[in-house]
């Protein structure tokens, strides 16, 4: 297969490109900034292509490309034209998003049917968003087939990239979200709090609109899903206050200032920070009779995991003799134990509790 990294000049895209070449892979490096893409292509000895994401132009550019790994966010803006171009050019599509809107778009019945008709595989979330939590969700479904409630979360210690922070800023004016009786349901940020042991001892946690609110439903069919991260107690209460300022924080003026600050001051964690950090992933399933199962697993830092996870998916597909078309989550494609095969991951630890 001939495959492409779109957004290879971004923080995560460049990390993936460099690691791909180290592992003997030869991706085409693409993006819309010629200087940065061509510099990287020359350094790594990779073919380069420069194009913006208009459907017609992108379709033409992808005619000889078998698979695209999309790394250029914010994905709510960039994924749709690239997916449409992939469907038109019969090119398989992967991305590293964690954005609920993109997952819902990819997994809509219409998109799944179009992918099947075009012979194209669509799989969003092949980085830290959402491979670890998606595999935990599937593992819990295997352990408890009759689960009615699913909670997922993680405790990360590494820094944040420019692109990820921009995505978070763009969400400041919105609410949190959960899956309730099968439907995506908003609620005020900071309204749901609990204490969770992610693997480092019990911490105060708040429910956030993480991608698994969407993807775990397609992976498991469990109708009630929440997603959690630990925060200092004062932040848990502060998040509720933040919700009151949503209209202001979501305004064009404030958003513009915050995004400019990110461009000027944020770079992302360096190699030593990525190497020394780790992430603890947690999940809990409960059934109607009160039985509860908890699963934990430790992974590499979020960005190191995204590099290793995305390339693990690419390699499986590039070397596959047969790819099933349609819309998938990572755990739907490769099963719950896929996470245990990715560099830096431990094995699942399972606890069962009778309420």
Image: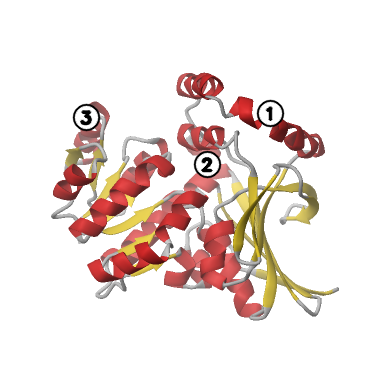
For mark 2, what is the residue? 274
Q: Kindly report which numbered mark, 2 or 3, lies closer to the viewer in this rendering.
A: 3
Lower position in the chain sequence, tag 1 or tag 3:
3
- Residue 224's x, y, as percent? 67, 65
Quarter where residue 126 is shown: bottom left
SS category of the residue bearing label 3: helix
Lower position in the chain sequence, tag 2 or tag 1:
1
At 61% across and 75% down in the image, what residue appears? 141
| Residue 11 located left or right of residue 142 | left
Q: Kindly report which numbered mark, 1 or 3, lies closer to the viewer in this rendering.
A: 1
Circle 1 crowding by C-alpha within 10 Å: few under 14, some 14–19, many from 20 = few
| Residue 54 located left or right of residue 262 | left
Q: Kindly report which numbered mark, 2 or 1, lies closer to the viewer in this rendering.
A: 1
Please tell me the numbered disc located at residue 245.
Answer: 1
Q: Is residue 86 visible?
A: yes
At 18% across and 51% down in the image, what residue appears? 62
Vertical side of 201 occupied by 142: above or below: below
Q: Quadrant of the C terminus?
A: bottom right
- Residue 300's x, y, as percent? 55, 52
- Residue 101's x, y, as percent? 48, 50
Q: CA distance from mark 2 to mark 1?
A: 33 Å
Vertical side of 138 occupied by 134: above or below: above
- Residue 322's x, y, as percent? 26, 75
Lower position in the chain sequence, tag 2 or tag 3:
3
Q: CA distance from mark 2 to mark 3?
A: 28 Å
SS category of the residue bearing label 1: loop
| Residue 275 located left or right of residue 229 | left
For mark 3, what is the residue? 34
Q: Is residue 22 visible?
A: no
SS category of the residue bearing label 2: helix
């Amino acid at each position: 297969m001939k495959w492409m990294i779109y957004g290879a000049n971004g923080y995560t895209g460049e990390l993936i490109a460099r690691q791909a070449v180290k592992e003997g892979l030869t991706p085409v490096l693409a993006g819309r900034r010629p200087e940065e893409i061509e510099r990287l292509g020359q350094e790594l000895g990779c073919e380069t292509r420069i194009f913006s994401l208009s459907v017609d132009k992108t379709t033409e550019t992808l005619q000889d490309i078998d698979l695209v790994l999309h790394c250029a966010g914010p994905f709510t803006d960039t994924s749709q034209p690239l997916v449409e171009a992939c469907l038109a050019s019969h090119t398989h599509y992967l991305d590293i998003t964690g954005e609920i809107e993109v997952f819902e778009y990819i997994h809509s019945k219409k998109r799944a049917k179009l992918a099947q008709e075009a012979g194209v595989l669509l799989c969003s979330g092949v980085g830290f968003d959402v491979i670890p939590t998606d595999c935990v969700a599937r593992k819990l479904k295997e352990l408890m087939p009759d689960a009615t409630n699913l909670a997922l979360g993680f405790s990360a210690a590494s820094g944040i990239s420019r692109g990820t922070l921009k995505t978070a800023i763009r969400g400041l004016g919105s609410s949190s979200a959960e899956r309730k009786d099968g439907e995506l349901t908003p609620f005020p940020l900071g309204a749901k709090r609990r204490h969770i042991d992610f693997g480092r001892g019990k911490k105060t946690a708040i429910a956030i609109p993480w991608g698994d609110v969407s993807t775990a439903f397609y992976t498991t069919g469990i109708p009630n899903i929440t997603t959690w991260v630990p925060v200092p107690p004062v932040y848990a209460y502060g998040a509720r206050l933040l919700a009151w300022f949503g209209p202001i924080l979501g305004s064009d003026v404030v958003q513009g200032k915050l995004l400019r600050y990110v461009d000027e001051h944020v770079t992302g964690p360096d190699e030593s920070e990525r190497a020394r950090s780790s992430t603890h992933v947690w999940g809990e399933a409960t059934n109607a009779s009160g039985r509860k199962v908890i699963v934990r697993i430790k992974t590499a830092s979020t960005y190191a995991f995204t590099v290793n996870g995305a390339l693990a998916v690419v390699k499986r597909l590039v070397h596959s003799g047969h790819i099933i078309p349609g819309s998938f989550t990572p755990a739907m494609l490769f099963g719950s134990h896929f996470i245990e095969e990715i560099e830096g991951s431990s094995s699942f630890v399972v606890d069962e509790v009778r309420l």
